[in-house]
Image (spheres, rainbow, N blue to C red):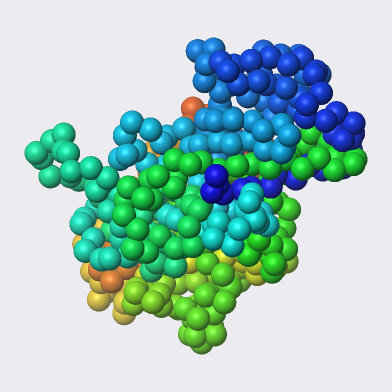
Amino acid sequence: MPTFVLFLILFPGASVARHPFNQDRGSTFCGNLNISFPFRLKNQPPQCGCHDLELECENNNHTSLVLREGKFSVQNIFYENETIQVVDSSLDKNDCNSLPTSSVTYHYNTYSSYNNKRESQPSIMNVVNCTKLIRSSQYIDASRCTTKSNTSSPPTSFFYFLDENTVLNLNQACTVEAVVPIMVKNISGMSTLAIYNKLSEGISIILRPFVGIPCLLVLVIYKWRRRHLSMDDKIEEFLQSHNLAPIRYSFKQVKKMTKNFEDKLGEGGYGSVFKGKLCSGHYVAIKLLCTSKGKGEDFINEVASIGRIHHANVTKLIGFCVEGSKQALVYDFMSNGSLDKIIFSEENRNTLGWKKLFDIVIGVARGIDYLHQGCDMQILHFDIKPHNILLDANFNPRISDFGLAKLYAIDESIVSLTAARGTIGYIAPELVYKKSWRHFIQS
């Protein structure tokens, strides 16, 4: 069974070794599947198994395991091998056009495959959604599983399978929907049906009970990350708990993009910004963060706030890099720089004209309105100022620098802060003069 094997390692504490997998501790069934320690069903008492290995039994015959990455159907549990075989629930056996939606790329450490055969070493495949047809042999059409068509109208989106190298130069019309393991060295030249068959084989999760190991699962990153990464705990926890769309680059790739940080665009308290270029020719701005500040909070705030959103007046986050103390964010390059260079220069302001300045104001307002009302969560920037408004080639504004941003539920009308946030001169008065209703009303 050529399956992609993930090792979920348990932290020291109460020993699991004292409770072997085949020991009867409240054994039950979901359909024909035996559920025994260390697994348990949701309706079973806590002593029957581990909380992190809690399974769901749907309609008394379908077993599911819910991880941070998504929901997986449990195909089998091999207690003698301490292995659980799962398949992405979004894959439909009766529909080879169904696509995987659960990303697991950054959360596990793969040491070897279950059968330890060289040919079974996994690779990483990306499922991408494009707004136009891409004519390239590297973009494997994810809809060619069958020749049948349910509609005569032209499609509005196109799905493709890409290998982990091709996605580094992703076409601008495409976004990454999911990042999944597949049990082949490379998907190049494979048919859609062959890829789907490999995906439908599922993955096997091996649980290795060592002496002094409890029931607390810790998800570890992949082996090629582990060789050279030592991530801050706060950042790693964030990356593990979020299914991110931006591309993850290595620091070596970042250095190559910037020609070893040759062209410096600016510098601030957050760090420095350099001009870079992707292999596709697309220009980018790379923010190299000062890791001595905020214990990774700036990185988390930026990725959490704009990592999933797309708006004409908000800076687009293309990718990021985290390697130990090195943290970088990759954005679209804005050729006309920041707004402060325009409005604080009488010559530039007069050249631009009042009509364009008014359009910039409207664009910024639309961006703020989208951040406050258009997302699943309210995104409060807390540092709106001319320096953080970037202008593209047509002088269209984009809000940038979300290092101080905070996320709140969309229905929260009152926001609590322990201290004023932002730049002196641009901070909202009510944040500085908390006890004065006069300042609150005037603001």
Q: Quadrant of residue 226?
A: bottom right
Q: Quadrant of residue 397?
A: bottom left
Q: Determine if residue 418 is in view.
A: no
**Quadrant where the N terminus lies?**
top right
Looking at the image, residue 219 sits to the left or right of residue 308; the answer is: right
Picture residue at 27% right of the left edge, 53% below the top: 141
Q: Identify which residue, 183 or 293, lies in the foreground.
A: 183
Picture residue at 73% right of the left edge, 16% below the top: 27
Q: Determine if residue 347 is in view.
A: yes
Picture residue at 31% right of the left edge, 79% below the top: 347
Q: Position of residue 398 (x, y in %)?
A: 37, 59
Above or below residue 154? Residue 320 is below
Q: Position of residue 67 (x, y in %)?
A: 60, 35
Above or below residue 220? Residue 284 is below
Q: Identify which residue, 353 or 314, lies in the foreground.
A: 314
Picture residue at 56% right of the left edge, 26% below the top: 64
Q: Residue furthest left?
A: 152
Above or below residue 204? Residue 18 is above
Above or below residue 260? Residue 254 is above
Looking at the image, residue 209 sits to the left or right of residue 28; the answer is: right
Q: Position of residue 103 (x, y in %)?
A: 50, 46
Q: Identify which residue, 136 or 314, lies in the foreground.
A: 136
